Image (cartoon, grey):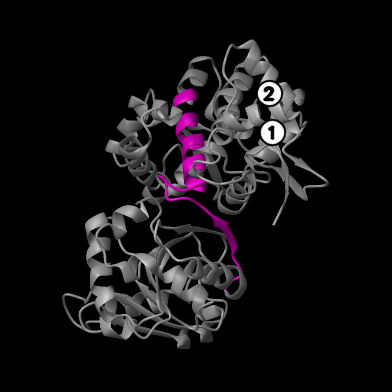
Amino acid sequence: MREINKVAVMGAGTMGSGIAAHCASKGLDVLLLDMPAKEGERNAIAAGAKARMREGRAPMLDEAADAERVSVGNFEDDLARAGEADLVIEAIVENLEAKRGLFERLEAVRRDGSILASNTSGIPLRDIAEGMPERLRRDIAVIHFFNPVKVMRLVELVPGADTSTEVVDSLDAFLSGRLEKGVVLAKDTVNFIANRIGCFWMLAGLVEGETALGQGVDLETMDAAMSAPVGVPATGLYGLIDLIGLDVLGLVASNLAENLPADDVGRACVALPAPIQAMLDAGQLGRKSGGGFYRMRKTDDGGRVREVYDHHTGAWRDGGQPALRAAEQDLAGLLFSDSAVGDFTWKVMGATLLYAADLVPEISDDIVGIDRAMRWGFAWKQGPFEMLDRLGPARVAARLDAEGRPLPAMLRILRDSGAESFYRGEGKEFLGTDGSWHPVR
């Protein structure tokens, strides 16, 4: 095991600053570097990021004094200082050549025994490390934090083909121990685990939402269905996209279109529906632009009213009350409802559960990693396989049989094994890809 006490973070944007602040709050000495400023103080970019760690209603740091553990610099003058760190985390722009260039420079200055990591959210590690020296390929991994770093529990740990077991074990112990994060071991596949499934859910929701709108289901009702009844945060689907930003989701869709396997069912929803693409083109991105699918309008009496955007007519209207029936207030009631909103839920959340069930062992060796990734990274109350257990896997399989559709991989394994659920013993054991029961770590 390699001891990690000094951390260097490359990139002082939102993610880099969040990672640096969290490490400092856990008692680690941190070096934060970014580009040199074009004018004035050369360390102004990193220094500004350090100052912002203490600002706002939810500061990145646990205590303002934790900032004293953060030193700042720039890539041109101070890169050699990163060579003193036990762990160097890259958190720069999501551009392959930029990342490769930085890692080539870091490899030249880092000491033996140090660990390199990328916080990339979607660029394969194999592309970053291709053709790099053996020492780098042995000592590098992806450690993908979720934003905001201080709040979100998930870190996806992704080793490369040549990453040493010692590095993986050391990062696992450091992230789960010193940083108190929930670590999920993922594979070097497009968007890893949480974003692979979560972005499918969002993109499928936008595609199927167009059909639901044509059947008279409004956005408020779709978001009501995609929240408490299925165990998703209150933002729902469209509200979450407003929070993330339609521009970010558009980039994710483009990345998926380029990198998903040719036979992946997610390819059916990587193109944004035309009216939503028009919103993106017009800069109507969500909260960051003052409005997306929703916006808040001040009233004459000083109150606030939530308005909903009709992306087909281009008009705003006052938000209404969701129209869910009493029987549609839980997951099973919605998925097996014969209503239009029930059909929407089956085609979005149901499809997401089936998608996850077909991605083992492609993106994770077991179902536990997938369930934890969705709970810790997207704040779902239950992961896909926990939801399937809640619904009854046999009931879901029977519906697929009736529709003449094939069972996804894990449902086939469950049926062949004779098991009735994916977990047993109050969640202490899970069904593996071998059809046998294994203890939950």
Q: Secondary structure at mark 1?
A: helix
Residue 240, relative to residue 45: is it above or below? Answer: above
Residue at 32% x, 32% y is 277
Q: Amino acid at mark 2?
A: Val
Q: Check residue 396 in the rendering and tell me which mark sits there, or answer none.
A: 2
Distance Cα–Cα, label 2 vs label 1 = 8 Å
Residue 398, relative to residue 376: is it above or below? Answer: above
Q: Quadrant of residue 281?
A: top left
Image position of 438 (left or right of 358): right
Q: Position of residue 7 (x, y in %)?
A: 43, 79
Residue 325, relative to residue 82: is it above or below? Answer: above
Residue at 60% x, 54% y is 376
The C terminus lies in quadrant = bottom right
Tell me where the magenta segment starts and ends, as one range.
Answer: 179-208
Q: Is residue 192 magenta?
A: yes
Residue at 38% x, 50% y is 122
Q: Position of residue 15 (x, y in %)?
A: 42, 64
Q: Secondary structure at mark 2?
A: helix
Q: Position of residue 286 (x, y in %)?
A: 41, 44
The N terminus lies in quadrant = bottom right
Depth check: give the residue in front, 307 or 45. Answer: 45
Disc 1: which residue: 388
Depth check: give the residue in front, 215 or 96. Answer: 96
Viewer can see residue 121: yes
- Say whether marks 2 and 1 touch (CB < 8 Å): yes
Viewer can see residue 11: no
